[in-house]
Amino acid sequence: MRRCLHRAISFLSLLALWLLLWGRITPANVVGGVLVIAFVIRVAPAGPAILDASDPGRFHPIAALVFALVFLKELVLATGQVAILVVVPNRVHSGVIRVQLSVRSSRIATVIANAVTLTPGTMTIDDEFTDDGIVLYVHALDATDPVAVREGVKKFERLAVQSFGNRQDRDALKLEVKK
């Protein structure tokens, strides 16, 4: 029963998002949305089947709000930095920086990679699963200070774990802090 309710809420949420994106509620938009959502759910299922059943993590709304606020601050700052780099192009020193994450959760790594990519001036271009965990390769428009770029990605990692992480993610982060 609970699983059906969860699926219904997810489906209706996606349909509402679909209709918001189209901007109008028409029979064609509703039918089109239902068909697209059904197809996507069938082709790319998500949910409890892909999460660690023993500790899937919890959503912490206050931590997620902090994550959103920090992300917005970084978005504004990065936009200003990119604007300066565009106006003074001889200052551009781009490069690819390897960032070793502490977490082994692909779910958390996806949140981090998206936050990095959505921030102007940086883009996650690849990931790698190694024995030491997940590595992100980040292209930075200003790679003059690779340590600062890594620290920015690690900040997103800490915030993502606090917002959505499971026990293993939190433990991995604690181990890194002790190093």
Image (cartoon, helix red, strand yellow):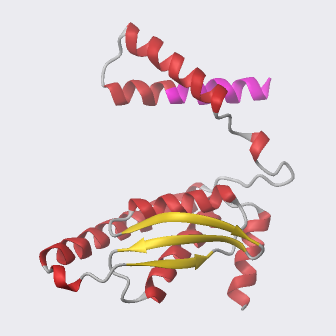
User: Looking at the image, how many numbered discs can be counted on the residues?
Assistant: 0
The C terminus sits in image quarter: bottom right
Q: Position of residue 46 (x, y in %)?
A: 68, 38
| Magenta span main SS | helix
In the current view of this chain or complex, which residue is farthest to the left?
Answer: 87
Q: Which residues are magenta?
A: 1-14
Quadrant of residue 83 within the rendered picture: bottom left
Answer above or below: position of 152 versus 63: below
Q: Is residue 136 left or right of residue 26?
A: right
Q: Is residue 24 left or right of residue 115?
A: left
Q: Position of residue 77 (x, y in %)?
A: 30, 73
In the image, 115 versus 160, the foreground residue is: 115
In the current view of this chain or complex, which residue is farthest to the right?
Answer: 54
Q: Is residue 64 left or right of residue 79?
A: right
In the image, 114 versus 64, the foreground residue is: 114
The N terminus sits in image quarter: top right
Q: Is residue 66 visible?
A: no
Residue at 67%, 58% (x, y): give it.
Answer: 106
In the current view of this chain or complex, which residue is farthest to the bottom?
Answer: 179
In the image, 29 versus 12, the foreground residue is: 29
Quadrant of residue 68 within the rendered picture: bottom left
Residue 6 covered by magenta stretch: yes
Residue at 22%, 85% (x, y): give it.
Answer: 91
